[in-house]
Amino acid sequence: MDESIVSNLKMAGTGSSNHVEKIKKFNRFYTNMIGIYTQYTDGSPYSMSEAMIMFEIDQMDKCTATHLSEYFSFDKGYVSRIINKLIKEKVIERVSADFDRRIKYLHITERGKKELKILADRASENVRRMIEDIDNTEMETLIQSMEKIEEILSKNHS
Amino acid sequence: MDESIVSNLKMAGTGSSNHVEKIKKFNRFYTNMIGIYTQYTDGSPYSMSEAMIMFEIDQMDKCTATHLSEYFSFDKGYVSRIINKLIKEKVIERVSADFDRRIKYLHITERGKKELKILADRASENVRRMIEDIDNTEMETLIQSMEKIEEILSKNHS
DNA sequence: ATAAAATAGTTGCCTTAAACAACTTGTTGT
DNA sequence: ACAACAAGTTGTTTAAGGCAACTATTTTAT
């Protein structure tokens, strides 16, 4: 896409402060820049939801379907179906907890790790293209600006 | 949602540069922070695509269905249906060009402007909440950091 | 001047995304 | 033991969005 397809609404009224409008402008700019939709899943065999679920299973120790459903606010049935699809494709596996046989822990397989690496590499490549022509000085400024934003916004946990 | 539902994949390998990884970290952080999915359309009667199309019609003079389709990389048929729905709801209207009767210009109505304002106000409110506890000094730093990022990334048009 | 190609938009049909609700199986508290 | 609850599953439905065939104009090439 040649422009933002998200976060592209501009102020329709006049009630907002200048700061809010500047931040909204940045939001539009930045979400456009990183191509939020296509960053991970464009051209990949996994939907965004599937990629998110694979990632979370990889990150999370003893991940369960219930956790995924709550964490992403996805319907339990939807999560269940995605899990079963990913198991069929052997990118994750399911192990029943011995102390409670309702609970099934989800683990990424070796094959799943490879698939995740492909997704992550694709995202890295997109980022790399975004910054390829930036010189060292500006690169430092860019990173510092990002770290500053994270620091400031992190304080008031939101 | 209590966490990011987009851009949440982390590096699965080790081939990427430190800068790329830092930027990906910022991407995850920031897309989580602004709640990309819910910023405009959560609790609204319009889907994200509908809101985007209304916005673009409002911004663009002499907007056409073809422009919308190309701009957003949406299917023509999908756009056509959304347009007809929005016309039925009287938030936009359609006027045939007199020099070419295939072309139909789209305009936002007064009612449409009001609806857009509701969407924009909701987004502003979300941003306002995000920054409500930030003091003046940090606020300036935040805005400057954002402007710096825009400036640096804008140069190499991406 | 007219047939052919291109353009704008519409409509039918299909696939996938994702929610809702009812259900099964297993666990816990009384 | 059994009611209430918790983890997942499955059936069904709606919405998002793409593909392809179509109509109706306009442009281009003969």
Image: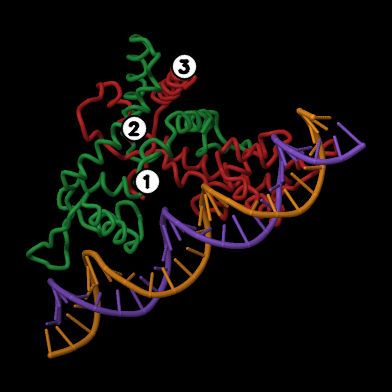
Chain colours: A green, B red, C purple, D orange
Dot 2 amino acid type: Ala
Q: Quadrant of residue A78?
A: bottom left
Label 1 to label 3: alpha-carbon separation: 28 Å
Rendered residue at 36%/32% (across/down): B27
Q: Quadrant of residue A119?
A: top left
Mark 1 vs mark 2: which is more N-terminal?
A: 1
Disc 1, disc 3: CB below 8 Å? no
User: In the rendered structure, the residue with mark 3 lies on which chain?
Assistant: B
Dot 1 amino acid type: Met
User: In the rendered structure, the residue with mark 2 lies on which chain?
Assistant: A
Tags 1 and 3 both on a single chain: no
Disc 3 designates what residue? B156
User: In the rendered structure, the residue with mark 1 lies on which chain?
Assistant: A
Mark 2 residue element: helix
Q: Is residue C29 above or below residue B33?
A: below
Mark 1 residue element: helix
Disc 2 designates what residue? A123
Rendered residue at 29%/39% (across/down): B9
Task: Please tell me which residue lies in front, A133 or A86.
Answer: A86
Q: Would residue B12 be found to the left or right of residue A96 on screen?
A: right
Dot 3 amino acid type: Asn
Label 3 to label 2: alpha-carbon separation: 18 Å
Point out residue B58 in the picture as x, y percentages from the top left corner. 67, 39
Disc 1 designates what residue? A48
Point out residue B83 in the picture as x, y percentages from the top left corner. 66, 49
Tags 3 and 2 both on a single chain: no
Q: Is residue C21 above or below residue A142?
A: below
